[in-house]
Each structure stands twice: as C-alpha cells, then as structure tokens.
Image: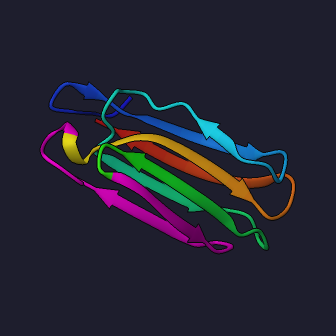
Amino acid sequence: PIADAGIVGQFTDGILTTTGATTFTVPTTNVMQFFFYNTHATANITLNLTGATGTAVLKVPALGSIAVWAASTGPSGAITNVTGTADVINATFQMFMGG
C-alpha cells in the first residue's frame, strides 16, 4: 500500500466485464488522489466521480489516462464514489485511489 499522511491508498488492475456501470470500491471515505489509466487498445471508458460538491463525468479514451491529485485539503472537495462504464466488454484499466 501507498500512504499519504497515514491514509492508505489502493492500486487496482481491473477489467470491466460488461458495458453497464460498475461501481469501484473506494479505500477511504474521502479520496484526495485519483489516477486512472485505460489500458485497453480500443475501449472508451466513462468515469463518474462523485463528491460532496457534485459529479464530474470524464471520458477516458483507449490508452488514455486522467489524474485528480490533491483535489482538496478536506472532505468538502473529496471524491466519495466512482463508477466506470466501458463501450466494449472486458475493457482493462489500472487505477489508484488514495486519501
């Protein structure tokens, strides 16, 4: 595990096995660091990041990545829920979430 200020983060190698929305388990109540890499050659993956102040919808193209790092110094701007939806089955990804 990777830790920042005592809060443990989680790295995941994953596969979205359907084209429906999949909810990812967050490792801590308030995620302050989020990195997502779409490792699939052709899939587009749409992410919904939810927090105390709203929702962000991000489309990650094939072999693309996004980072939301130190989004806030407190829970008011933290990410609290993440879902991913792929446009093909068995879309692969790597992801890190930390507090």
Q: Which quarter of the figure is the N terminus placed in?
A: top left
As displayed, is residue 60 above or below residue 54?
Answer: below
Report whether 89 appears left or right of 53: right
Q: Position of residue 13 (x, y in %)?
A: 63, 43
Q: How many marks?
A: 0
Q: Where is residue 71 in the image (x, y as percent from the top left)?
A: 24, 54
Quadrant hosting residue 42: bottom right
Asked whether 77 falls inside the magenta stretch, the response is no
Highlighted range, magenta: 54-75
Q: Out of 1 and 51, give the one closest to the viewer.
A: 51
Q: Position of residue 69 (x, y in %)?
A: 28, 56
Q: Residue at 30% x, 34% y: name it.
A: 30
Asked whether 59 falls inside the magenta stretch, the response is yes
Report whether 15 appears left or right of 55: right
Q: Residue at 46% x, 32% y: name it.
A: 26
As displayed, is residue 12 above or below residue 90?
Answer: above
Report whether 36 appears left or right of 5: right
Q: Residue at 62% x, 38% y: name it.
A: 23
Q: Out of 79 and 14, give the one closest to the viewer.
A: 79
Q: Residue at 59% x, 46% y: name it.
A: 83
Q: Where is residue 91 in the image (x, y as percent from the top left)?
A: 77, 56
Q: Which colour scheme is used?
A: rainbow
Q: Which quarter of the figure is the C terminus placed in?
A: top left
